[in-house]
Image (spheres, coloured by chain):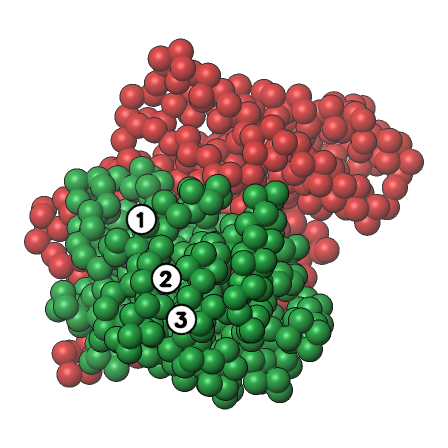
Chain colours: A green, B red
Amino acid sequence: MKKLLLASTATVLLAGAASAQDVKIGIILGFTGPLESITPSMAASAEIAIKEVNDAGTLLDGAAVTSVRADSTCVDAAAATAAAERLVTSDKVAGIMGADCSGVAGAILQNVARPNGVVMISPSATSPGLSQAEDDGLFFRTAPSDARQGEVMADVLKDKGVTSVALTYTNNDYGKGLADSFQQAFEAAGGTVTISAAHEDGKADYSAEVGALAAAGGDLLVVAGYVDQGGKGVIQGALDSGAFSQFMLPDGMYGESLIAAIGEGLEGSFGTVPGTDSDGAEKMLELAKAAGFDGTSSYVGESYDAAALMLLAMQAAGSAAPADYKGKIEEVANAPGEKIYPGELAKAIELLKAGTDIDYVGATAVELIGPGESAGSFREYTVTEGAFVTDGFR
Amino acid sequence: MLNALVAFLNFVFVPGLAYGAQLALGALGVTLIYGILRFSNFAHGDTMAFGTMVTILATWGLQSLGISGGVLPTALIALPFGILVTALFVLGTDRLVYRFYRKQKAAPTILVIVSLGVMFVMNGLVRFIIGVEEQAFADGGRFLITAGDFKAWTGLKEGLAIRTTQGITVVTAVIVVVALFWFLGKTRTGKSMRAFSDNEDLALLSGINPERVVQVTWIIAAALATIAGVLYGLDKSFKAFTYFQLLLPIFAAAIVGGLGSPLGAIAGGFVIAFSEVTVTYAWKKVVTYLVPADMAPDGLLQLMSTDYKFAVSFAILIIVLLFMPTGLFKGKSV
């Protein structure tokens, strides 16, 4: 903390001498509430991106960037709105890095960001609902929507030539959302979902569920459940009764404990889990280590990318006014252009100044699609000889 | 044709039979308590959990000593120990809690609420001792017949799998039921229990010791609960929470059969188990095998989604209470 204070005072002093402009970025995350264990690392990650830019001192011809933290609480929309309102009206931030949870992110977007025309980049809101939200081009996210995985799963099946599957999901928002988006994508690609049946977690017996799934049939069974809950029970039941012998396992079903519990029967099953093979992830870990926080914590990379994207877009637009730079965010994030990894923000600014196009890859291989959200990168794996073997990334 | 039969056996009959046997044993315990102590024992599900927990701990002990049942699960060797501890625990509960209310001639409703309290205490105790996670304690051979082997033998498209635990469940249930009926019908203690159940005053006049009848009833109920719990745990898996959920189908079984009637409890167990499985089963596969190819159904032919499994027990319970309040086997009306 002392170091951070020293560093930021130093940069403020330095920049204060050189520039006429001061750029403020609001960091609104749930520092209290359900995500309080991961938000400090997320904020620290965004702040090292800001520090990197300040150290270079070249952004917008010497503007000093400062960050202002605010508490989104993750769950209380009213409190989050009030906090964001303060950031915008009293601190006059040029952009908001946040919010973390989908519910409060939506509330801030509608109540604060849109009325005031402030750009928001969320590092961790994954609800598919936000894709359809009215945002006036102001809302972006560096984490993929849950709906994306459904499409990726459908692609994997298509490539493997599977045309008919049975589908079971855990009966909650995650399972239902993933199952629906998968079914939609798979059917659009010409596949057939013979049955989409929910299962409850925490039961001892899934023979009725397995019976229904088996009767509907299909080349394999897609299990959108949890690795240590009903998902495991359904797989065990399906194997025991000989109903299915191959399974597709999305992220909730990825875990060593599944292989330990099921054993041989899982051989040849495959699935998808978020992950990237980009060099960015490794560089991010080094940056985090140097700054003294845990780089493996959730959404650290996404947070760095959110802050970095915002700053680079300002440089690309030559202005810190949200109305000017909001259109530049996708341009900076996407190909074509020179690839930019974490720790190369100074280089990126120089390139932008020289008029060269950049492709910000960052820690999480950011590629913005559709309504300004990360395409997300998924790792495809197969269970081979009792271990998860990576087949590729998509 | 044979394929249809095998699919039916594999997904409906075999699981239903094993589940029915487990429910029947549970319902027998409930019905005995109701017949003799005259209240619905809500703590029965958690008595099952308690008995299973003790058996699991004993199984682990045996396993660490290197004793195993070979092809059969080690838990069967540990079962008598589980029954003994559970019986002592239940007798202790009776002495500490129920006897007080019995002396006061408390109304059955009060005893039901008391058993609810006992249920919560036992529930907490089980979670405290063994934890809330799933515990696997089945060992030995997993299958009598695997689906793959069956297909290879018969050349049919459908496989039939019978797990060892399903076989053990049915065999054990038959042995236990035969033993119970012999006990109730032929032994002096059993006869005195029936007399006490039929007419308490007359039984007291003929010199039957009520406390002894009550004790024997608790011991038998504890044994039945432990056996039912261990079989269920072996066949499925042990988790404190799932035993609590079993309470509803068990009561449904006991009431459908007629509370207080042992024969009814067994019939009720199978009625509930088979209804749960058949109503939520998608008949598409079976029908496709039976009818000519061009008449094969497109839909799933599923009466109800599997989400509503528990609703089936509820519905049967309500229908029986409306039209046959004393149950299929003329038990006591509720």
Residue B293 location (% of width, % of height): 14, 78
| Labels 1 and 2 share a subunit | yes
Q: Nearer the viewer, residue B70 or A384?
A: A384
Secondary structure beneath disc 3?
A: helix
Residue A393 figure quarter: bottom left
Q: Residue at x 48, y 60 (%)?
A: A54
User: Is residue A116 in view from this perspective?
Assistant: yes
Q: Earlier in the sequence, mark 2 or mark 3?
A: 3
Q: Nearer the viewer, residue A172 or B241?
A: A172
Numbered tag placed on residue A345 in the rendering: 2
Q: Is residue B215 left or right of residue B247?
A: right
**Callout 1: residue from which chain?**
A
Q: Residue at x 59, y 47 (%)?
A: A6
Q: Amino acid at mark 3?
A: Leu
Q: CA distance from mark 3 to mark 1?
A: 21 Å
Q: Nearer the viewer, residue B245 or A4?
A: A4
Secondary structure beneath disc 2?
A: helix
A94 lies above or below B126:
below
Which residue lies under the disc numbered 1?
A: A282
Residue A38 location (% of width, % of height): 53, 51
Q: Amino acid at mark 2?
A: Leu
Residue B47 figure quarter: top right
- Answer few, some or many: residues within 10 Å of disc 3's Cα (few below 14, many 20 plus, some between 14 and 19): many
Numbered tag placed on residue A312 in the rendering: 3
Q: Nearer the viewer, mark 1 or mark 2?
A: 2
Q: Is residue A247 left or right of residue B55?
A: left
